[in-house]
């Protein structure tokens, strides 16, 4: 114990808390820690055992496996290039409301051939659209979620949405 009745450990904890709190107030970007840049999107689906084969066999993603609860699959891990994403059955009414209400974009190197593959594998993709930002097509999964496959060409498109540097996007007047 120190002369004022506080232990050195307690005093150190108080000082550390004040130091961290002070930094967070000075720079709000530091309030939640350091981001790595990795993002793991999750789509809510009504039946993960039906959705996973669609994503693997029709859209061409790599299937990593299921996670189970009480012996039943509720989550499927999928891979797109170097990114993972999940298919998740709802566990609450709030999550149930999001089934079929989401959109994910995936960058591909070969849009037209990928479109043809999705058709050949039994999918029903929309037409290829050319916008100021990207060329793309949309496929709806069995629940209605929109899966977008897209390419960008810096010589033809106003921005590169895949650029990892944070920049303000110009207003093209086109939304998709």
Image (cartoon, rainbow, N blue to C red):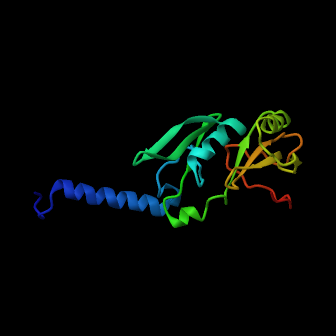
Q: Which residue appears at 80% of the width and 46% of the height?
A: 124
- Percent across and percent down for residue 120 are 81, 35
The quadrant of the rendering that contains the N terminus is bottom left
Q: Quadrant of the C terminus?
A: bottom right
Viewer can see residue 111: yes
Residue 86 in view (yes/no): no
Residues 93 and 50: in front is: 50
Horizontally, residue 78 falls left or right of residue 146, namely left
Q: Is residue 66 above or below residue 91?
A: above
Q: Give the number of marks.
A: 0
Could you tell whether 156 is left or right of 102 in the image? Answer: right
Q: Nearer the viewer, residue 168 or 109?
A: 109
Measuring from the top left, give residue 129's x and y in whole percent.
Answer: 87, 49
Position above or below: 135 against 95: above
Quadrant of the image occupied by residue 175:
bottom right
Residue at point 53%, 58% (across, down): 90
Along the viewing direction, whichever of 82 and 22 lies nearer the viewer: 82
The image position of residue 46, as x and y in percent, is 59, 55
Quarter of the rendering containing residue 155:
top right
Q: Residue at x 59, y 35 (%)?
A: 63
Give me the residue at 89% from left, 48% from top: 130
């Amino acid at each position: 114990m120190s002369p004022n009745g506080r232990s050195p450990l307690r005093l150190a904890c108080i000082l550390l808390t004040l130091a961290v709190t002070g930094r967070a107030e000075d720079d709000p970007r530091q309030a939640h820690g350091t981001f790595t840049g990795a993002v793991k999107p999750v789509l809510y689906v009504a039946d993960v055992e039906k959705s996973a084969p669609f994503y693997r066999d029709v859209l061409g993603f790599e299937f990593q496996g299921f996670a189970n609860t009480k012996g039943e699959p509720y989550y499927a891990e999928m891979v797109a290039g170097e990114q993972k994403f999940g298919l998740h059955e709802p566990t609450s009414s709030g999550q149930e409301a999001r089934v079929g209400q989401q959109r994910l974009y995936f960058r591909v190197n070969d849009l037209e051939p990928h479109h043809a593959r999705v058709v050949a594998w039994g999918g029903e993709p929309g037409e290829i659209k050319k916008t100021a930002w990207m060329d793309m097509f949309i496929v709806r999964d069995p629940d209605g979620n929109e899966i977008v496959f897209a390419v960008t060409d810096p010589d033809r498109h106003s921005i590169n949405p895949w650029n990892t540097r944070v920049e303000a996007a110009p207003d093209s007047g086109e939304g998709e």
